[in-house]
Amino acid sequence: MTARQTATTCAAVLLATAGMATIGGCSTSARPAAATTVTVTVTGETGAATSPDGAPATGTPIRTGTAPTPTGPRPTAPLPTSLAVGHQRGAPHSYAEAKARFAKARVDGSIHGTFRSPSGNIQCDISNAAVVAGCEVDKGRIKVPSRLCPGDAGDASDTAAAGDRVRGVKLTDLGALPVCGGELDGAAGAPKLAYGSATVVPDSPFSCLSEEVGVTCIDTDYERGFFIAKNTFVTF
């Protein structure tokens, strides 16, 4: 596994229903070490979250030391959990499973950042100018316990305070995080990424794959990722 030595860290990159917006300040630092996370499965819209052994998923994950040693200050947001929410139909549940799908996909060299699914219901942004990538759905947002939306770097606007429906997922240095905050403004007209196609951004660890079942995005530095579709999302 490789890791970028330096990257421009931004608070959040997400898309609104109409398009894309970038929020937050930026600074240059090394990407911090990733954390091993517990798995949480939510079986209903308001079902309780549990770890694989059935206990409440409140423990602190154990670090493995396999990611780059951080050289700058660590983010202050809570560590994420691996989530499986909604019907999960056709969703990958591991980085290895997702990576195998990318290996079979066509690479669309014309799309380097912002894109939509062919249906237009899923909108995403990945960029070589940030270490955050995100997707959100227009219709089919999931209602889950608010504690599954930890926000980013303590930013209250990114938590469930504005509602307890997950509208998107983003990849950050802490892993894949659900996003429940308020709507963002942006421009319409992002290109559509055809089913079976992947977009790869030069000099970026992020890639996304469009399939009929949904969109999968991965971080090849930390071997993390997420899947999102109408009424479901999975993080790994």
Image: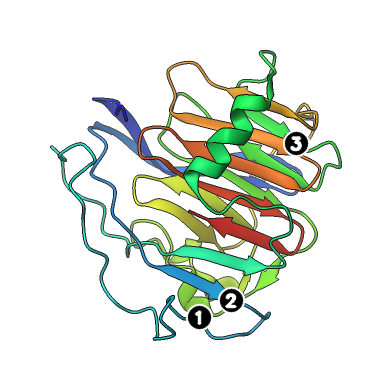
First of labels 1, 2 by sequence position: 2
Judge the density around disc 3: few (<14), some (14-19), many (≥20) Cα neighbours within 10 Å. many
Distance CA(mark 1)–CA(mark 2): 5 Å
Residue 116, label in figure:
3
Question: Which corner quadrant holds the N terminus?
Answer: top left
- Callout 1–callout 2 Cβ contact below 8 Å: yes
Q: Which residue is mark 1?
A: 49
Residue lying farthest right? 119
Which amino acid, mark 1? Ala
4, 164: nearer the viewer: 4
Dot 3 lies on which element? strand
Residue at 21% x, 52% y is 64
Which amino acid, mark 3? Arg
Which amino acid, mark 2? Val
Drawn side of residue 205 relative to residue 178, left or right? left
Drawn side of residue 171 relative to residue 182, left or right? left
First of labels 3, 2 by sequence position: 2
First of labels 3, 1 by sequence position: 1
The answer to which image quadrant residue 32 occupies is top left
- Across and down, in percent, residue 200 comes to 57, 22
Distance CA(mark 3)–CA(mark 2): 27 Å
- Across and down, in percent, residue 72 comes to 15, 40
